[in-house]
Image (cartoon, rainbow, N blue to C red):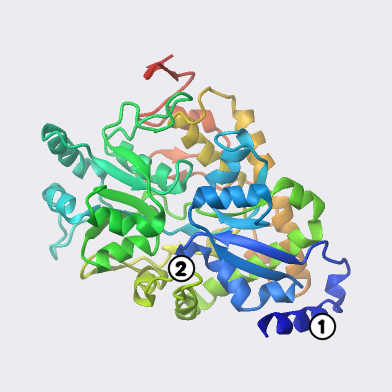
Amino acid sequence: MKRLLAALAASTLLTNPAFAQDLELDELTFGFIKLTDMAPLAIAYERGYFEDEGLFVTLEAQANWRVLLDGVISGTLQGAHMLAGQPLAATIGYGTEAHIVTPFSMDLNGNGITVSNEVWDMMRPNIPSMDDGRPQHPISAAALAPVVEEFRDEGRRFDMGMVFPVSTHNYELRYWLAAGGLHPGLYSPQDITGQINADVFLSVTPPPQMPATLEAGTIYGYCVGEPWNQAAVQRGIGVAVITDYEIWPNNPEKVFGLRADFVEDYPNTTRAIVRALIRAAMWLDENDNANRPEAVEILSRPNYVGADAATISASMTGTFEYEPGDVREVPDFNVFFRHNATYPYYSDAIWYLTQMRRWGQIAEAHDDQWYHDVAASVYRPDLYMEAAQSLIDEGLASAEDFPMGSDGYRAPATLMDGIAYDGHTPNAYIDSLPIGLTGAQRIEDGAVVN
């Protein structure tokens, strides 16, 4: 019945002058992972924005990020909610090689780092307290360093989880550890574990499995998107020590990925997809997040995130619970449209590439222009602005909602360690970072050489 109604709605809408050009393809299947930040897809479907564009969309949860990427490459999925690093890594041939592009950024922020209760109890004496006795935030990984040393003295390896080698979570966890003086390990073409010279050993765990893996003692902490940090807190098995908002306020997160040939072959369909997703993101953030309770109910359904509504709400509605009872205001923890969240900035892409180089996933040094060229081949603000302008022309959005005239680079930002990031000068940024490869360094036989 829903499909019949969608067809009737679409046939009516397609008579509108706004649809002067026919869609090249109108039946689409999109993939996602069960995380809060897939919300623009769920809302575009449930609010009828895809239908408004004449699109018949099926949304399918995927088992993990690799399966999702393979689906897009093979064409069983026409597009997907993706880790921002996935289109970049595929395009430069790190892992599976394929040209994937993104005309739409899904969100800002939304991740956290959680540790087990055992580790938290060991960290807590190293963390200053506020007047009310609660720990002072942001919490540096320097508080974790003595714990890792104690584990080492006991012959225990300190293992932590992240969701995928080219995920924001991997890079944020590494950034936090390195800023606190802990080495998270290096990659090389011969050793893709990412554990060369590591003090803390990182490995992949699918997001929904993070709390259970922590509880089982297989890992002692992890970095993941919501609702899986709040799930650990509410189950009483872990403490969230820091959010990515505290590491880098309004940092880029997921993207919507499409094959480059799809974009070339189906430009009208691509524009329709981006229009629907922009409208969904606007709805999620409008009126100071007034629609978030409804979004929480939608996301809690089994076919989307499938977590308890209270767990999703804990971070989705402007607060974040670090440990039981320690609830703090974090109004921008999940951002879907504010701060130009949906615009695919080249500088966002370049930050991911700098981290891939820092940790050895990009094995050789490249000049600055290489970073700019790769970013421009994957991130497509031109496609985004074409869709945005059409919404403005139809009165569905306002020009002030978009970065009109942008050169594709955000203003320089300063992260938690006080180091500034400017996407215009990637190599200078890489060279400013403590721990990790700099300059022309590379890994040979497990050792760093110049």
Residue occupying the point 46% across, 47% down: 168
Residue occupying the point 26% across, 46% down: 140
Disc 2 residue type (three-letter): Val
Horizontal side of residue 311 vs 106, given as left or right? left
Q: Mark 2 and 1 residues: CB-CB less than 8 Å, in contact?
A: no
Q: Which mark is residue 372?
A: none
Q: What x and y, as percent, mark residue 259?
A: 69, 48
Question: Which residue occupies the extreme top position in the image?
Answer: 450
Relative to residue 119, is residue 152 depicted above or below? above
**Label located before the other in sequence (2 or 1):** 1
Is the C terminus in the top left, top right, bottom left or bottom right quadrant? top left
Q: Nearer the viewer, mark 2 or mark 1?
A: 2
Q: What x and y, as percent, mark residue 423?
A: 55, 39
Mark 1 — residue? 12
Residue occupying the point 69% across, 52% down: 75
In the image, 74 versus 301, the foreground residue is: 74
Q: Residues within 10 Å of mark 2 (few under 14, many from 20)?
A: many
Asked if residue 137 shows in the view, the reply is no
Q: What x and y, as percent, mark residue 329?
A: 33, 68
Task: Identify the secondary structure beneath mark 1.
Answer: helix
Horizontal side of residue 3 vs 69, given as left or right? right
Image-quadrant location for residue 171:
top left
Asked if residue 394 shows in the view, the reply is yes
Residue occupying the point 64% across, 66% down: 277
Q: What x and y, as percent, mark residue 276?
A: 67, 69
Horizontal side of residue 422 vs 183, given as left or right? right
Q: Residues within 10 Å of mark 1 (few under 14, many from 20)?
A: few
Relative to residue 141, is residue 450 depicted above or below? above
Q: Which mark is residue 305?
A: 2
Image-quadrant location for residue 269:
bottom right
Task: Identify the secondary structure beneath mark 2.
Answer: loop
